[in-house]
Image (tube, rainbow, N blue to C red):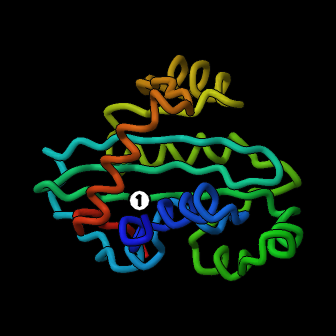
């Protein structure tokens, strides 16, 4: 079991929890940070007219990040571009509780702070529409929690984007998660650094 767990944070956490009866923390995560850091930076070709982009949206309101990912596949390599939002009034609190350099990430453009103490979904909508102009989105999959109004009434009905609910359950997430892990471990993922 130990040999099988080597190199996989997910398997190491399961080994600790189920075989060694040791408590693990969320930081004992699914994706190996070293594998993620080894991914080369995105280098999209100049002409994207034949490239199909998809989006994924996970909303939050107050204490967590809201996230939108654009993804495309070119020559069997997945290119991933992400945008994160957090309420500006919660930055200091989030830095303290999560022990992360959030203000630095905001200053460097990795995270976008929206005014106030709740994430402004209007900013998210505006940003998604701008990204859709840059790289037209074939479809946006979304976590249904907190997303019905923004996705169905605004992005779909008012803005004409195709949206699809993706429940965050094992039957819906297991296969794509395993495929992403396979691509990551085989060096076929590129992302913005």
Q: Is residue 172 above or below residue 9?
A: above
What residue sits 34% from the left and 52% below the top?
A: 180
Quarter-of-image position of residue 89 = bottom right
- Residue 139 horizontal/vertical position (percent): 37, 31
Instruction: Judge by depth and name the residue closer to the eye, 140 or 25.
Output: 25
- Residue 43 is left or right of residue 76, and the answer is right
- Residue 147 is left or right of residue 193, and the answer is right
Instruction: Judge by depth and name the residue closer to the eye, 81 or 124.
Output: 81
- Residue 153 horizontal/vertical position (percent): 61, 19
Q: Is residue 151 above or below residue 38?
A: above
Q: Is residue 21 above or below residue 70?
A: below
What residue sits 70% from the left and 65% below the top?
A: 22
What residue sits 19% from the left and 58% below the top?
A: 77
What residue sits 68% from the left and 41% below the top?
A: 122
Structural crowding at the residue carrying mark 1, measured as other residues with C-alpha within 10 Å and reported as few (<14), some (14–19) or many (≥20)? some
Quarter-of-image position of residue 125 = top right
Q: Is residue 72 visible?
A: yes
- Residue 93 horizontal/vertical position (percent): 89, 68
- Residue 70 is left or right of residue 115, and the answer is left
- Residue 15 is left or right of residue 150, and the answer is left
- Residue 31 horizontal/vertical position (percent): 47, 64
Instruction: Locate the N terminus by quadrant.
Output: bottom left
Q: Report which residue position mark 1 lands on.
A: 81
């Amino acid at each position: 079991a130990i040999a099988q767990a080597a190199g996989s944070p997910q398997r190491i956490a399961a080994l600790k929890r189920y075989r060694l009866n040791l408590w693990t923390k969320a930081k004992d995560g699914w994706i190996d940070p070293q594998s993620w850091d080894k991914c080369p930076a995105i280098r999209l070709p100049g002409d994207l007219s034949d490239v199909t982009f998809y989006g994924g949206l996970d909303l939050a309101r107050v204490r967590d990040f809201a996230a939108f990912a654009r993804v495309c596949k070119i020559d069997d390599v997945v290119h991933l571009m992400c945008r994160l939002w957090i309420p500006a009034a919660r930055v200091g609190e989030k830095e303290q509780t999560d022990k992360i350099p959030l203000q630095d990430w905001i200053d460097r453009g990795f995270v976008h702070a929206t005014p106030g103490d709740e994430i402004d979904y209007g900013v998210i909508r505006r940003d998604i529409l701008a990204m859709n102009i840059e790289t037209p989105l074939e479809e946006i999959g979304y976590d249904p929690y907190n997303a019905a109004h923004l996705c169905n009434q605004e992005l779909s009905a008012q803005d004409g984007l195709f949206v699809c609910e993706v429940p965050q359950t094992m039957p819906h997430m297991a296969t794509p998660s395993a495929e992403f892990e396979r691509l990551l471990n085989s060096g076929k993922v590129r992302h913005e650094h």
